Image (cartoon, rainbow, N blue to C red):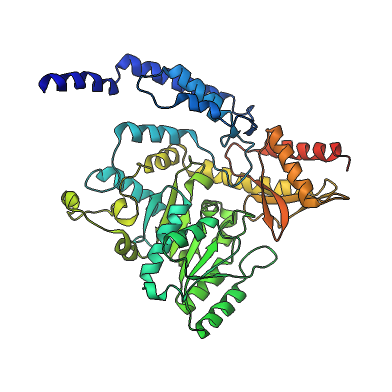
Amino acid sequence: MIERIKELEKISRLLSPSPEQKENWNAQVLQYSANFLKNIEQDKAYYHSEEKGKGIYKFDISEEPTEIDSLIKAVEGNIDRVGINPASGGYLGYIPGGGIYPSALGDYMAAVSNRYAGVFYAAPGAVRLENMLLRWMCRLMGFPENSAGNLTSGGSIANLIAIVTAREAQNLKARDFERAVIYLSEQAHHSIQKAIRIAGLSEAVLRYVPMDENLKISANELEKTIIDDRKKGLIPFFIIASVGTTNTGAVDPINDIADIAEKYGLWFHIDAAYGGFFKLVPQMRDKFVGVERADSIILDPHKSLFLPFGTGAVLIKQKEALLEVHHYLADYMQDTRAENEEISPADISPELTKHFRGMRLWLPLKLFGLKPFRAALEEKIYLARYFHREIQKIEGFEVGPAPQLSVSMFRYIPAKGDANSFNKKLLEDIQKDGRIFLSSTSINGVFWIRVAVLVYRAHLAQIQLLLEILKRKKDSSGL
């Protein structure tokens, strides 16, 4: 047995590469990354490909090792040069974010040390750092110091945590689910409906509250609907409002909705995944009046703080309610049961094992300070407004509601033919060109093209390029 152990040890030690091997890997990965960033201003925002990355299948898992240079080439040809390039300043589709460079360094440090940031006992400093970041977000949103929160993988898990917490805090039982009523807008993010189903509330009544002409929830209609539902013997229990809808960036009337939630005893949840950090911009603070009155808020630092994908947050005002839902202990974790100064992330989330996400957020915020983040967000607001103004100067184009944050919608109205079909083709042409990537949405059967300005590398040059592309494509169509 000893001989076999020694044989296996010799092979398993290959998992601890020599300093020379690490230096070689580091050099090649860093060189590839440096070239990627060096050329990012010239690279496309979208790479059209017939193969769609199929070449990566040639690099399936095998018994023997592969040289890193061939692996890097495989990544470049089948991943980084196919589809959307979300690091590009020309990526103006969906709700973009960024992938700011120091976050990669934070992730590297977190992965190398592999700190387990799930429980205080295991990594007290890591837990303190993440809770410190969450307390900063709570202060930004006006939540009290004794609120609690969790760094999540994104808005989907954050919404799920909030909905499950609300379900228990409002004392809903399974027998009540068919009479429970959830109020939301048709512009609410689809992760809300997904979270409702996962939370076991698929039998609950979903009330889609009528919206005003700017696609915001009508507070008057919301209150009338709640009153009517109570008369019917239903149980109104949860209201969802948005600070920045995905389609248009609309901000619902938060303070008016807070009044209604308090009056009728409903849990008030705000989806601020996209728009939450715009509160850093002084001129936008009037749109956030009343956010401090919510029971829960979600934020996505991987959107409006420009972090890599996989960085969300949920803030819950009732810390006890959050713990009541998620706190469990196993016998093998009995060593972690001591009284702790900080809440452990594993006690307030579905996740037990988790990546030390705090490093990717804390490091860039400390290296840069808040000032450039605030300036970048304000710049994106002005860029969306600029596009909204300038596109109207090109004959034949019409626009959606004026941008409230950094999303603008437009479409072309052809002299003849179907406008929806024309704009779908226009969008396809823009994507094939690749220098700018846009996305689309449909509202009341109307096909709109969206311009979502949020990548930190998106500047005036990209907006002017987009306007130039649209003008040329309009002129070349002969319309």
Name, please, the residue furthest toward the top. Answer: 20
x and y, in percent, of residue 210 in the image: 63, 70
Is residue 331 shown left or right of residue 424?
left
Q: Evaluate whether residue 172 shows in this view.
A: no
Task: Name the residue: 33% across, 65% down.
Answer: 321
Task: Name the residue: 67% across, 68% down.
Answer: 212
Is residue 449 shown left or right of residue 108?
right
Q: In this picture, is 88 found above or below 67?
A: below
Q: In this picture, is 94 found above or below 290?
A: above
Q: Quick one: quadrant of the N terminus?
A: top left
Residue situated in front as seen by the camera: 46 or 74: 74
x and y, in percent, of residue 459 in the image: 65, 38
Q: Quadrant of residue 43?
A: top right
Name, please, the residue furthest toward the bottom. Answer: 231
x and y, in percent, of residue 164 in the image: 39, 63
Q: How many marks?
A: 0
Q: Quick one: quadrant of the C terminus?
A: top right
Q: Quadrant of residue 11?
A: top left
x and y, in percent, of residue 255 in the image: 54, 69
Q: Evaluate whether residue 166 shows in this view.
A: yes
Task: Name the residue: 30% across, 19% down.
Answer: 17
